[in-house]
């Protein structure tokens, strides 16, 4: 077995960490799907000519009737609730993952790809093929620990988080090259995106006007965003490196909100980064911290 | 799970996630994206089709993406742009659809007319001081009562 494979298979995560990721990511996907149900209906009322299927939605050459789209949306949410609870894991998890893939693909088939959904879908699909219901799952007896343990599964989710950022960084190098670093392209993106928002009644980002007048700030943000994206694989090393990267990536998303009013809730509220941290240890650490303060 | 199976599953999923790197960077997809959206150089002088309202006294009213049948600005603009590309008939049909939504939306009470227009905008000038470019009206339609 190679050194990389041995590193990948390090048994350094308890079943509870993977279970916590299943609960948080599954619950997020469930609520997200429920919130999209009215939009699924609204989209199905659009003329069929506007339907341009992407991904799994290519299974359907034409749009669904509104009632059917709503029914499938609710069914997907129910499956994802069972996914989060770990119910009948081996049967339910793959079906729930495929249902989410279909639902989001259908939503993305009307003229716009929502990149905010990519990582959520990848996480749910990956979780579905891991032993994520060996702990904290309803109706499941604690199963014998598999030979591979749980560390690889947590690392897989972290690798998917890192991969999406890395790809975004590589895209900047392929499409813009070194010119990305002078900040002009970022300025243009900020201007165009905010113009679109202003024309269609959405809020213009609070710092967009300030940024247009400060080239040095834009150059710094352009370099910083590229460093975060290309540096994402380093987060797989764990420990302090992972925590620093997560903080930098979170700050990057905050910057996107302030400059473009584009919200990526999955990373902004944390689930995207959980696989790179040790969330199951936080309650105990918080208790220790409180005891330390009291003592 | 056996270690070999865990490695195989991991390699397959990570390879799939990274596979966009070998595609044309403009060939976006879902959920395996090439992430071209912020990386592609764009001209800030652009022709863009959008919808707005007019009150009965002629005052211009900014509409929102909800009346185009989506919660997303980009999707709404794409819908309007595609209707324009398909021709006058589709643009007028979309205009009527938006007018129907406006008539049902309390937040747009008082809007008497919906206009679909194409503007030649300078995004930076617009954001700096609100300068608007010339507009061509593509379709107009009355907002009937709810």
Image (tube, coloured by chain):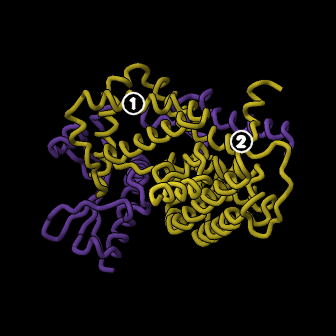
Q: Which image quadrant for residue A140?
A: bottom right
Residue drawn at the location 21% of the way across and 40% of the way down: A210
Instruction: Pinpoint the chain carrying mark 1.
Output: A
- Mark 2, residue position: A12
Instruction: Say which of marks 1 and 2 sits in front.
Output: 2
Neighbours of disc 1 within 10 Å: few (<14), some (14-19), many (20+): some
Q: Residue A105 or A216: which is nearer the viewer?
A: A216
Q: Residue A58 or B32: which is nearer the viewer?
A: B32
User: From what the image shows, is residue A262 above or below residue A175?
Assistant: below
Q: Is residue A50 visible?
A: no
Q: Residue B5 or B133: which is nearer the viewer?
A: B5
Which chain is assigned yellow? A
Quadrant where the image shows the N terminus of chain A: top right
Instruction: Pinpoint the chain carrying mark 2.
Output: A
Q: Is residue A190 visible?
A: yes
Q: Residue furthest top?
A: A178
How many numbered callouts?
Answer: 2
Q: Point out residue A126 in the picture as x, y percentages from the top left corner.
A: 70, 47
Residue drawn at the location 50% of the way across and 34% of the way down: A168
Residue drawn at the location 38% of the way across and 27% of the way down: A223
For marks 1 and 2 on the same chain, the one whose residue lies earlier in the sequence: 2
Which chain is assigned purple? B
**What secondary structure is found at the residue carrying circle 1?**
helix
User: From what the image shows, is residue B89 above or below residue A41?
Assistant: above
Task: Tell whether B41 sits left or right of A14.
Answer: left
Q: Point out residue A187 in the picture as x, y percentages from the top left corner.
A: 30, 33
Task: Tell whether B50 sits left or right of A65.
Answer: left
Q: Point out residue A204 in the picture as x, y percentages from the top left corner.
A: 27, 51
Q: Are marks 1 and 2 in contact (CB under 8 Å)?
A: no
- Mark 1, residue position: A224
């Amino acid at each position: 077995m190679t050194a990389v494979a041995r590193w990948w298979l390090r048994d350094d995560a308890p079943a509870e960490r993977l279970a916590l990721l299943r609960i948080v990511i599954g619950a997020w996907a469930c609520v997200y799907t429920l919130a999209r149900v009215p939009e699924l209906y609204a989209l199905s009322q659009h003329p069929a000519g506007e339907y341009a299927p992407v991904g799994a939605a290519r299974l359907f050459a034409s749009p669904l009737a509104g009632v059917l789209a709503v029914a499938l949306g609710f069914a997907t949410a129910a499956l994802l609730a069972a996914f989060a609870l770990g119910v009948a894991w081996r049967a339910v998890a793959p079906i729930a993952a495929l249902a989410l893939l279909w639902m989001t693909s259908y939503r993305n088939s009307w003229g716009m790809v929502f990149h905010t959904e990519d990582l959520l879908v990848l996480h749910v699909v990956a979780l579905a093929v891991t032993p994520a219901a060996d702990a904290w799952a309803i109706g499941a007896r604690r199963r014998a620990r598999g030979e591979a343990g749980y560390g690889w599964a947590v690392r897989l989710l972290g690798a998917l988080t890192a991969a999406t950022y890395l790809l975004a960084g590589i895209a900047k190098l392929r499409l813009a090259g070194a010119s990305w670093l002078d900040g002009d392209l970022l300025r243009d993106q900020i201007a165009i995106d905010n113009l679109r928002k202003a024309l269609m009644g959405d809020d213009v980002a609070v710092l967009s006007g300030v940024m247009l007048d400060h080239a040095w700030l834009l150059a710094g943000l352009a370099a910083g965003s590229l460093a975060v994206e290309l540096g994402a694989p380093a987060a797989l090393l764990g420990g302090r490196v992972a925590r620093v990267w997560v903080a930098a990536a979170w700050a990057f998303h905050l910057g996107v909100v302030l400059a473009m009013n584009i919200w990526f809730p999955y990373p902004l509220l944390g689930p995207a980064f959980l696989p790179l941290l040790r969330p199951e240890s936080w309650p105990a650490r918080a208790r220790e911290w409180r005891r330390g303060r009291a003592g | 799970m056996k270690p070999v199976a865990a490695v195989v599953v991991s390699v397959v999923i990570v390879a799939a996630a990274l596979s966009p790197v070998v595609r044309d960077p403009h060939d976006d997809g879902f959920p395996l994206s090439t992430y071209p959206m912020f990386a592609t150089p764009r001209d800030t002088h652009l022709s863009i089709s959008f919808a707005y309202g007019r009150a009965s006294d002629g005052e211009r009213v900014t509409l929102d993406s909800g009346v185009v049948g989506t919660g997303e600005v980009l999707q709404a603009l794409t819908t309007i742009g595609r209707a324009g590309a398909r021709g006058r008939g589709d643009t007028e049909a979309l205009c009527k659809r938006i007018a129907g939504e406006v008539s049902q939306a309390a937040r747009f009470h008082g809007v008497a007319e919906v206009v679909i227009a194409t503007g030649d905008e300078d995004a930076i000038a617009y954001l700096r001081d609100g300068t608007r470019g010339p507009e061509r009206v593509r379709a107009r339609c009355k907002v009937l009562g709810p």
